[in-house]
Image (spheres, grey):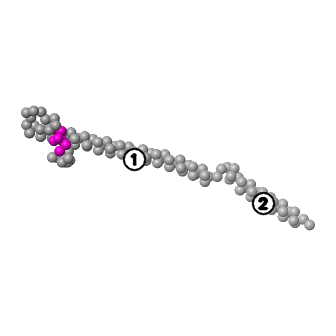
Amino acid sequence: MKNNNTTVSSQTQQQAMQVAKATQKPGQTKEQTKLIAQGIEKGIAEYKKRQKQKARDADKLKKQSLKKKQKQTSPQEKTATDMETTPTPSASKLPWFLLVISWVGFIAYTLLMSRP
């Protein structure tokens, strides 16, 4: 049996027939029972379809939240590594200070050594 371009499995048909027979009233014909079973099949198929859609939607939301978390953690990681590689103002002054002291020492040494 086709229903909106989807086929109903034989297991679903059997379940529908069992439910239809279980709820069968006295004096009900086989044809009526089959119609009830078909209605139950449609209901089961619709239920399964909705459950699959809910699962897909939940999966999409989960993936979106993971992407958001990754995007949020990526800039924080970059800023943390940038802070580690970027020298602080006091650290960048240290090499210049040492250079100046070494030149002053070199000049003082040459001036003192040049005097007899």
Q: Residue furthest right?
A: 116
* Residue 5 shown in magenta: no
Q: Say the numbered circle drawn on residue 63.
A: 1
The residue nearer to you, when weighing 11 against 102, is: 11
**7 and 72: which is toward the camera:** 7
**Which of pointers 1 and 2 lies earlier in the amino acid sequence?**
1
Relative height, residue 36 to residue 108 (above, below): above
Instruction: Check the image and report above or below for 85 versus 41.
Output: below
Q: Quadrant of residue 101?
A: bottom right
- The answer to which of 27 and 103 lies nearer the viewer is 27
Secondary structure, magenta segment, majority class: helix
Q: Residues within 10 Å of mark 2 (few under 14, many from 20)?
A: few
User: Can you give x and y, in whole percent of width and height, for residue 73 in the image?
Assistant: 50, 47
The structure residue drawn at horizontal position 39% and vertical position 45%, both measured from the top left corner, is 62
Q: Secondary structure at mark 1?
A: helix
Amino acid bearing label 1: Lys
Report helix, strand or loop for mark 2.
helix
Q: Is 14 covered by the magenta stretch?
A: yes
Which image quadrant is residue 102 in?
bottom right
Check disc 2 and report the residue beneath it. 103
Q: Which residues are magenta?
A: 13-20
Q: CA distance from mark 1 to mark 2?
A: 61 Å
Please tell me in which quadrant of the rendered image residue 108 appears.
bottom right
- x 54%, y 50%: residue: 78
How would you rate the neighbour count of disc 1 (Cα within 10 Å): few for under 14, some for 14-19, many for 20 or more? Answer: few
Q: Is residue 20 left or right of residue 99?
A: left
Residue 4 shows up from this direction: no
Q: Is residue 101 visible?
A: yes
The image shows residue 65 at horizontal and vertical percentages of 42, 44
Give, as a three-letter code, the residue at label 2: Trp
